[in-house]
Amino acid sequence: MSALATRDRSPGRRPQSEGPSRELATGIAGTRESGAPSDHSAKSPSPSRSSSSDLAYELAHVVQGPATPAAQKPAVGLPHLFGLLGSGLYGGFDSTCAVLRTLGLLPAQRGVYWKGHPAPRHPTPCNTHPTAPHLMDPMIASGAKCRGVCGPDCAQSCRAEPDEHRCVPDSTGLRHHICVYQGVQNCGTHRGCRDHDACYDWCSEKGHNSLADGCHRWCDLGCVCDFGTLQCIGWALGKGPFDGRLRFYDESVSQIIGPFPGTCPTAALVVTARLRQYLDLKDPTAMLDMLARAPADERLHLSAAPAERDQLLATIGLPHRQTALAILADAPSWAVPSLDAATVHLADRAIQDQHRDVALSTLLVALRRRGTVDPRLAGFLYVGGAHAEDALTSFRLVQDPVTRARRAVPPVRVEIYDKAFVDTGWLFSTVMHEHVHVLQVLHGYPAREFRQGQQRSRFVERDEVESYLWEVEHAVGTGLIRHAAQLTDIGRRLTTHFTAMPGSLQARYRVRVRAALALVAQVAAGVPQLGIDDARRELVRTSRAIAELLSRRRGRDDAVDAQIEELRHRRAKALVTVALVDNPALQVVGPGDPGTYRVATPDAAGGIRYLYGGISVGWHLAAASTSAHTLGGALRVGGQMAVAGTAIQGRVHPFPPDIDFDEHVHVVADDKEEAARRAARRIVAGVFRISTGPRPGRDDLEFRHLVAYPVGRGSTAMSLGQLQRPDGVSKLAKLIATLDGGNLNTFWRGFLADGRFINLTRVVFVTARRPDGSPLLTARGSADFNLAQLADPGAIPATPLARFAWDMCCDARRRARQGNWLKAAKRAYNYFSTIGDTPHMAALEPVFSRPEAEMEMYASVVEALRYALLEWDRDTPEPRTRILSATMARKQAENVAQKVLELLPDAGGGRGPHAIAEELRAIAGQFRGRDRWDNLEQAPWLAQRLQAVLKDIRRHVSASLEYRVRPVIEAPLAAACRHCGSRSGGGGP
């Protein structure tokens, strides 16, 4: 590729820099057509004469070259000039080209020719590597892609190639990264195409932005003069001949993995030695087994060594090649898409060899690693011998002495029998069937479901229906969708248990059961079903359409939003399929989009509760901190309580820094003022229950202040002291009455179950109606996209997808401009997830598992300590803490200092991690207690020092993540929401 870029650089030619060659076809057609002047030229006065000096003057003006002898003449408009050229004034193209060549005015003669691909706008270890493919989108002024390719952008001459892995050194030379180049294209090129792209890009850089302007037509003429009209048109259509190939990759969906210790040559030696161990096995199946058991880093480095990888694949042989490639890529299994290929291969091998305990252990390791099953809740074990069932869950229910409700005590015992080991898909489905039972018994049952100490049979049947529904609804992920006999067996069992329930219970499940049995019947009849690959392709296709519509959203919100809702409706089945495959822990409550879905999460007592959300939330929902229910229950003032933010995206965010709560408070009243007073009384009572009185209401939570955010007006804060005044409720009521769709943010601080002291936010939305149902107060929200409810909300109303996507996109761009790359990545991920852009989601997900993301968990502790030391937060007084002692504050600071040394990368500039840790310890040494309970004394000067520490930590975090995040989010977000700040949207959620 580099030879192509450097050869034939004679002054008479210009290689190409980049540019949509469809412009070439348009420009040439405009020059060749009837010969009539363009619209602009028709408006220009006809000159009394034209000469080569006039022509020289005009082209010199365009290319900003040296002045000609005619430089003092009045300019003739370029469109008019080319109209004259097209009319044949100079005897057609041949004579025109001869004049331009004689005068030295062809693009190449003016130095406008291909000089190589544009340098990366934002260099990274991957896009600057000398053997890397070129950037598909170099983000240049023209906006064109695949520069140097014959045809428009990445044209029909391009062919897709597999992803590439490459080892590249980091800036220190002591470590290395693995670059994963994705979306690789191999495209035809020719010097004429390269030169033409270079000329188009030059025009765009000079401010000529129309394909019909004189500068672009000059580029077209340059191609015609050098290669002929028909050849240039052929290139514009993506046809040959080509003099070489250029390779490109899509940086926005690619990954930079690492850094890893050691240099690339050292890593290559390790890979070579490891390859010899593979080859010594001789048996291809044994090699596959070894590859599947290998650590992910080993497989990654094998992929980055093409010669060794190809030798291994050749030895493994063609029959196993696709399995080996999937294992190397850590890709999902084709047979069981909810599991990775390595797990399925090893489990299948163990089943074939009758090593059933090994097969079960292999499956459970994978499920526990993903958080799908929790070993604290249940013990799964293989029990051989003759058994009528596939598996059995055993438990002992314990009765609550007050409520008489009953639930099991973990761990629950689950026995898996021989009949479950048909294949890995059937075993997986069986394990998850029993896992649903585990969650049921740990969640518990109300007293009314029991008679004489035994659970009534109708409720036993209900539990079986729920488990069998999981198996049918997850049939794509388990692979049962491809096995009609297996799925038919599940359908038969589901029917048996469903018909054994009374009608009142059947009504609750009828919609889901009918859909499940219809699916079973279709599969049995051989009717093709939507597979996971087709579902993912549909999501990608609709995400591109949604992004394109968003880019035109300014000034036509209603029309664009309606079109996006149509796309949302069309993609619903694909989204549900993908979400259920990606998240086996997800249970259906009500199907569809948004529908209602739930995931189990442990509570502080060792039992199970559920988080509920729409399908967009459920896609990434995982077990949350026990604090979600503990603190959420404490904060609740009778409304519908929910959790927001990364705390409910555990499938992709293993390090949520905090927990954000939302509460929807609804009241019924005769008028708006009374409704506001009722809501205010409930909110103030909730604050007083925790943060007033001689002793704190809780030792893990306290109130700071609240702020009202009405729509279209400035915010208003109220401190704890203001709420305690006699007119506190009435003042808050006035704020609520004027929210006009806005919300209250109540700010708290407390301790999470993991021991961290952090700030907490509960956003309160107040709605009200009259007894006749007419609205008094309304609130805006996007619960179907960003909230997980702590209790079953029933039907979750759909809100506009475009609005939430727009808010996330705009806020991601704002955070990026501020240099907060971790927060920008989180907002961008929400945007990509909302529109269904799975390639960009996959490119961002590794960022959230990095040490920088974990460090942010502890940066939030520094922030909370800082606020505990402040006397004022801007114009609002901060209450003195009654739950954080000086001793505990010192322990919190010491824990952060240790994490700084362990996790924080040194991005250079300013204080490094060691200096930051020492400063934290020095500040903590000055923490003082103010009373006999050792409650931390406020010290604003220490808060200022903590603010500097916090800034340093986040500077290192952001600087370390920028080159991983910016390439993924910059171009897609700029294209979709470039009009942020217009009347169609705001800058953030």
Image (cartoon, rainbow, N blue to C red):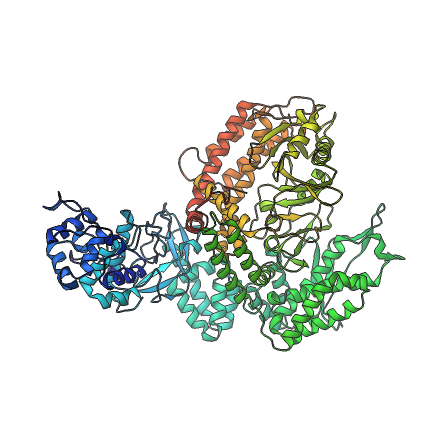
Q: Depth check: 196 or 149 in front?
A: 196
Against 420, residue 877 (above or below) is: above
Q: How many marks?
A: 0
Q: Depth check: 967 or 306 in front?
A: 967
Q: Depth check: 392 or 693 in front?
A: 693
* Residue depicted at 39% across the width and 56% down the height: 167
Q: Position of residue 544 (x, y in %)?
A: 47, 58
Image quadrant in which you'd find residue 878: top right
Q: Is residue 32 left or right of residue 699?
A: left
Q: Position of residue 437 (x, y in %)?
A: 73, 60
Tell me the quarter of the image containing the N terminus.
Answer: bottom left
Q: Would residue 287 be visible to someone looking at this image?
A: no
Q: Would residue 696 be visible to someone looking at this image?
A: yes
Q: Is residue 43 left or right of residue 508?
A: left
Q: Is residue 701 left or right of residue 253?
A: right
* Residue depicted at 31% across the width and 63% down the height: 151
Q: Position of residue 264 (x, y in %)?
A: 37, 54
Q: Position of residue 560 (x, y in %)?
A: 50, 53
Tell me the quarter of the image containing the C terminus.
Answer: top right
Against 680, residue 26 (above or below) is: below
* Residue depicted at 82% across the width and 51% down the height: 405
The residue positioned farthest toward the bottom in the image shown: 525
